[in-house]
Amino acid sequence: MEFSLKEDYIFVNYHYIRDPSEKYKGINSCQLAEFEKQIKFLNGSFKIVSVSDVVTAAVNGTADKFCAVTFDDCLKDVYLNAVPILNKYNCKTTLFPITSVFKGQLPSVHKIHILLSNFSAEHLIDFFNDYLKREYAELGNKYKIPKDRRISETLRLDDDILTANLKEALIFIPRVLKNDFTDSFFKELKLDEETVIEVFFMNRDEIKELAGYGFEIGNHSHCHDNMTNLSSYELIQDVCTSREVLSDILGNKTKIESFSYPHGRCNAEILNVLISQNFKHALTIEERGISKKDNPFLLPRYDTNSIRDYLKSVN
């Protein structure tokens, strides 16, 4: 659904906030000038508050318009580039860290961004399909990545077909196979995961600092896997591990009540786990405003590109 100012209660999601560079051309980001334009617009049209406050306003039908700005992954860009702009407009936001990075484990989705900065999507797909056939022949064509059609007609439309297919397919590929594939390229590029993490992600002190300034901290899982691929036991282990890491950073008194689904994927089993772990609400990537009738564990959220397109249409 296209964004409209008719909405009273919304979430807007961001990831990378950086200007383009040749070194990291595989990263799709919201550029700094565009980010400031969007924050200025949102701040002038809504009260920018926490996720919890938007949900409360929607449930109560509060007369004012409310928006929560969220950042999935807690990338270093947010600390270096977004926070100064947010401070300029006196905005506090909600951060959803991937906690495996604090254990030296780089999520596969970010490995792919690095690989796409060094190799073409076609090269990576060809290599993966050959690798699959050679090393995992028993899987047949189950995980083969197509090149002649778009896997999803509704997601990743800002990417070309091959790039979109590579990203989308790897969400559903088993962790072992995915890690084997990405690690082989990391070895070729002589890249160390912990070094990449230091460059790309906020560290513990930075997250603690922002929490102290009033930024809400949510849970974005530990490993950033497609959670619909996990068993109930694996789901609980992942969520609890993430919560423990965040408690170690922020202290046990900090309540982590919001959850952002990795890749936006969820199902009834995941919802039940979150409820059992005392979360209050969870955010998807369905693009529309929030209503009082929404399931608190299936809350919609606009992408930065939707705000960008709206601002283009009215200017």
Image (tube, rainbow, N blue to C red):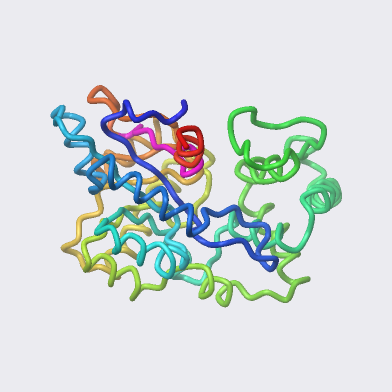
**Which image quarter: residue 120?**
bottom right
Residue 190, image x, y percentages: 73, 76
Magenta span has 118? no
Q: Is residue 109 left or right of residue 125?
A: left
Residue 142, image x, y percentages: 74, 35
Q: Please report the residue visible at 47 percent of the width from the left and 68 percent of the height from the top.
A: 201
Residue 43, image x, y percentages: 29, 47
Q: Please report the residue visible at 55 percent of the width from the left and 64 percent of the height from the top.
A: 106
Residue 179, image x, y percentages: 66, 58
Q: Is residue 135 visible?
A: no
**In this orientation, which residue lies closer to the viewer: 129 or 6?**
6
What is the magenta range? 297-306
Residue at far front of view: 315
- Please say if 44 is above or below 73: above
| Callout count | 0
**In this orientation, which residue lies closer to the viewer: 81 or 240?**
81
Q: Please report the residue visible at 61 percent of the width from the left and 52 percent of the height from the top.
A: 175
**In this orientation, which residue lies closer to the viewer: 251 or 238?**
251
